[in-house]
Amino acid sequence: MKVFLIHVRDPQFYALPAKTRAKNGNIRVMGFPPIGIMSLSAVLKRAGHECVMFDQANPDTPNEFIVEEIKRQEPALVGLSFLSTTSYPYAKILARQIRASSPKVKLAFGGVFASLNAPLVKMQCPEVDFVCRGDGEQLLLDLLERLDDPTDVPSVTWMKDGQVVNNPNRKTERNLDQWPFPDRESLPLDFIESMPLDVPAVLSMERFTTMQTSRGCPWSCVFCDIPIFNEGKWRSRSPQHVVEEFKHLQKLGYGAVYFVDDHFLLQPKRIEAICTGLNEAEVTIQWGCEGRVDSVAQHLFPAMAKAHCRTLMFGLESGSQKMLDRLRKEQTLAEVETAVTNAKQAGIEIVHGFFVVGLPDETIDDMKSTFDFAARLPLDTFGFNRLCVYRGTPLWQEYVKRGLLDEATDWYKYFKCSAIDPTCLPGEVINDVRRAGLRRLFIYKLMHYPLQTFRLLRRFLRYMPVRDVAYLLMKPFLGKKSGATKSEVLSRAVEHGQLKDDAAMLTQISDERLDHVLQESRAERLRIQQEAMGLHDCSEHAATPTH
């Protein structure tokens, strides 16, 4: 059978750099590759099916193009994959466009948000035939055999005789080695490695991709839905399988890989075996991963560095122990300091800290403690995001019990906690304290870690205009009315009229307004990208030496 797989994106999580073409002619995207549909494509092709992939980041294949291709090629199934609440509005619009053009094609949703809200998604978006829950590999193969009657396909939500049917969950698959490596070569896009979009800075121009070596996380932080999606289980591929994929990627010319594992640092023997295997195979690809600061694998940080681990990212969250306990992080400030210090002493080049602000019960002093704590840590980069609440998390359940959220009307939305929780600081106060905290942090870093700061800036300056790097440093000192650089706009903005740069608001508007808002978004985004292209061309021309 022929299957179309579409990766639906929230525009704030990718960018199109001014110079959009790679040497091989592919469009270049600053963001993560759609490893979900790439993995499913490899599974389908191995089973003898035909698969065509689309990524909404690709300006050469806008929604209108995808809709026409579906109408022309008539695939048996079209799968729309998306991860988060903020991508759901875009998925709804595209599904309705496809259904209007091709009334008979079978449509399926998949991804974390769809899995956690399957019956509600099916009722709100009747254009979609199936909502697929959890792991998609075997599920998709089974569904293709029973498109007309999926009664016996576990983990599928569908409609029968006017009623939503939620088929039983399939047993969690632990043998992840059985699946082929993702189909990375069939999508005409090249991806640029950058820091997380709260630090919109390019790390390298090596050919970049992502890899998943494990799934799940057994911890239950109040703001995270990963344990619910993975039923509190952690599953991993064997070290041998991971090393073989690295060797495969090196043959294809990749120079950088980032693990999308929720917690890579969980099993020391496995980490040691992966590092040993990479060294023995003479793999030179640089890689990065995420993990918790209470990992018992910290003695392996030197081995990871020797195996070309360049980037290690920790979820640090707060510099107040009271706030860490409120988030149920089950970690201490001493553990944070130890982990970050150990990583830097082991030779990890870039150690990043994720922090959140605007927490329930957080005071101004708690926020100040977070920035002061971050300044004292030997971190290379850091991000401070407002805490948001998503359905499926323990915090969401708390808010429902407190009467701050309504399950019936709010399930498909997400909110900044400060917008709905009276125990949070007001948004303006959070922004003011964050701005002042960043100023103190930057000054402290420049004075106490000058060499570390210089090395990082030198890396950024290899790939970014000087004005953009300078702006990243100066932004906290420029006051409230200063605007974003083109790079930052392209990396972070959601352009849709009056709702610009506020993805939370986009999930809360009515379906009647949604299509109009997204049309405005596309037009504004295109305008900004074209303006950035013009500026880039002018700067290149001005920089050309004369003889």
Image: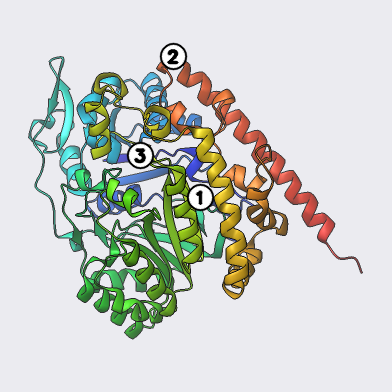
Q: Tell me the crowding category of disc 1: few under 14, some 14 to 19, or many 20 or more residues within 10 angstroms, Cα based.
A: some
Q: Is residue 507 left or right of residue 322?
A: right
Instruction: Tell me the distance, in whole angstroms, between the alpha carbons under discs 3 and 2.
Output: 36 Å
Residue 318 appears at what percent x and percent y? 39, 53
The residue type indicated by label 1 comes to Leu
Query: Upstream in the sequence, badge 1 or badge 3?
Result: 1
Q: Are marks 1 and 3 in contact (CB under 8 Å)?
A: no
Q: Which residue is the site of mark 2?
A: 512
Q: Residue furthest bottom?
A: 280
Asked if residue 305 is positioned above or below residue 103 in the image, the reply reads: below
Asked if residue 112 is positioned above or below residue 89 in the image, the reply reads: below
Asked if residue 124 is positioned above or below residue 502 in the image, the reply reads: above
Q: In the image shown, does 456 or 4 lie closer to the viewer? A: 456
Query: Upstream in the sequence, badge 3 or badge 2?
Result: 3
Query: Upstream in the sequence, badge 1 or badge 2?
Result: 1
> Which label belongs to residue 99?
none
Residue at figure coordinates x 52%, y 22% from the top left: 517
Q: Which residue is the site of mark 3?
A: 361
The residue type indicated by label 2 comes to Glu
Residue 204 appears at what percent x and percent y? 55, 65
Q: Which residue is the site of mark 1?
A: 197
The residue type indicated by label 3 comes to Asp
Residue at figure coordinates x 65%, y 59% from the top left: 464
Q: Tell me the crowding category of disc 2: few under 14, some 14 to 19, or many 20 or more residues within 10 angstroms, Cα based.
A: few
Q: State the image quarter where residue 259 is shown.
A: bottom left
Instruction: Tell me the distance, in whole angstroms, between the alpha carbons under discs 1 and 3.
Output: 27 Å
**Which type of secondary structure does the marked residue at label 1 adopt?**
loop
Residue at figure coordinates x 33%, y 66% from the top left: 334
